[in-house]
Image (cartoon, rainbow, N blue to C red):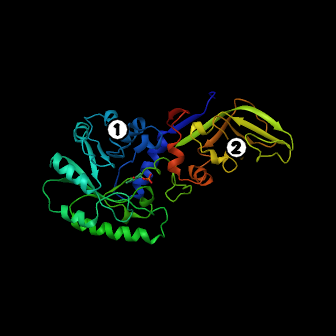
Amino acid sequence: MPHRARLTVDLSAIDQNFRTIAEAAAGAEVAPVIKADAYGLGAARIAASLWKAGARTFFVARLEEGEAVRRCLGSDREARIFLLDGLIPGTEDRVRRSALIPVLADAGQVTAARVAGADLPVGLHVDTGMNRQGLSLPELAELSNSRDLRPVLLMSHLGSATRPEDPRNRLQFERFAAARRLFPALPCSLAASAGVFLGPEWCFDMVRPGVSLFGGGPFERPDPRLRAVATLYAPILYVRTVEAGEHLGYGSNLKAERVMRIAVAAVGYADGLLRRGGGRSEAWFAGARRPVCFINMDLLAIEIGNTPAAPGERVELLGPNLPLDDLAAATDTVAHECLVRLGTRASRRYVRS
Ligand SMILES: *Cc1c(COP(=O)(O)O)cnc(C)c1O
């Protein structure tokens, strides 16, 4: 065990999740979303690995992310890389140089694409009710006969797919159907991770999973169909006994009501854990879940009862024994945020299980 926190990324678990999603998507192309450095897990390694697993289309958010993925896949490979940020005026040359495909998401971007020329392939993002980005249906209708654009994909994004019973899903579906009637020949995509698992009718020609490739359940709870990808371990530095009546850590709201045995591990919020997980989240040690008492910048404490423990032994903070979605629920956030924070101080290692 190294002397600091280690993040292990299991590339074969990603491959397996890719295949599981492909099966659920019933024939639709699976286009991995590897924005934000593949949710903090390392876009370069993951893009190359997913290419080997059969992925040919990728999505990123920022221009720089697209350039980095292109560098790692190489210009000879026929990978399609879509930019969810669209076409920012002034970036046309860089977009072309890296052969990126901007997904146009407002009228200004459409104008920029027309100026750039009809040889530039683009995606069209239609807003079906998320009200974050995308062309309105009337704006889209105006484009349906234009010859100065070269659309290769029509897409939209669901705002409530993690809650299958939410009527907003059906409303967005109907609006997407109307958009498709304007571009009947264009391949189209609506579903991210959650949408895939709503059922085959949501998958159309292409699906865009992110978090479920990396082990996050589509419905914000652990899903047995998906494998854990990221594991965060940290070594124990100190094992201590706290006498009854003593206070623990900063402040005075943590008081030992009885004699407590704690293990202090070399991991904290500087390694990407959320500080508010103290008192709420759990860690895995010696075959059982243990309460996390507090999380400081470099150290956290877990209560271990009578279990023997020694410096150098390892504690799991996230992984096969501590599902990502449980950590997210315990810290009041989504799996996406838990993952994306981990790419900071912890050393990263790639494995194939
Ligand atoms: C981030 C994102 C995705 C992937 O979402 P997940 O919930 O991680 O599967 C897909 N499409 C768009 C437009 C996104 O912004």
Extreme residue toward the front, this view:
251
The span from disc 1 to disc 2 (Cα, nearest Å) is 37 Å
Residue in the image at 50% along x and 49% along y: 336
Where does residue 232 sit, x and y in percent of width and height?
Answer: 59, 39
SS for callout 1: helix
Ligand 1: does it lie within 8 Å of the C-beta at label 2? no
Does 93 appear above or below 195? above
Task: Say whether marks 1 and 2 touch (CB < 8 Å).
Answer: no
Question: Is residue 91 rendered to the left or right of residue 237?
Answer: left
Tell me where residue 286 sits by quadrant.
top right
Identify the amino acid type marked 2: Phe
Does 142 appear above or below 104? below
Where does residue 68 sit, x and y in percent of width and height?
Answer: 35, 35
Question: Is residue 218 rendered to the left or right of residue 181?
Answer: right
Tell me where residue 128 sits by quadrant.
bottom left
Residue in the image at 48% along x and 61% along y: 162
Of the numbered discs 1 and 2, the one sitting upstream in the chain is 1
Extreme residue toward the top, this view:
3
The residue pinned by badge 1 equals 64
Where does residue 114 sit, x and y in percent of width and height?
Answer: 17, 51
Crowd tier of the residue under label 2, counting other residues whose Cα lies within 10 Å: few below 14, some 14–19, many 20 or above: many
Tell me where residue 38 sits by quadrant.
top left
Identify the amino acid type marked 1: Glu
The residue pinned by badge 2 equals 294
Crowd tier of the residue under label 1, counting other residues whose Cα lies within 10 Å: few below 14, some 14–19, many 20 or above: few
Ligand 1: does it lie within 8 Å of the C-beta at label 1? no
Q: Can residue 211 be spotted in the picture? A: yes
Does 169 appear above or below 275? below
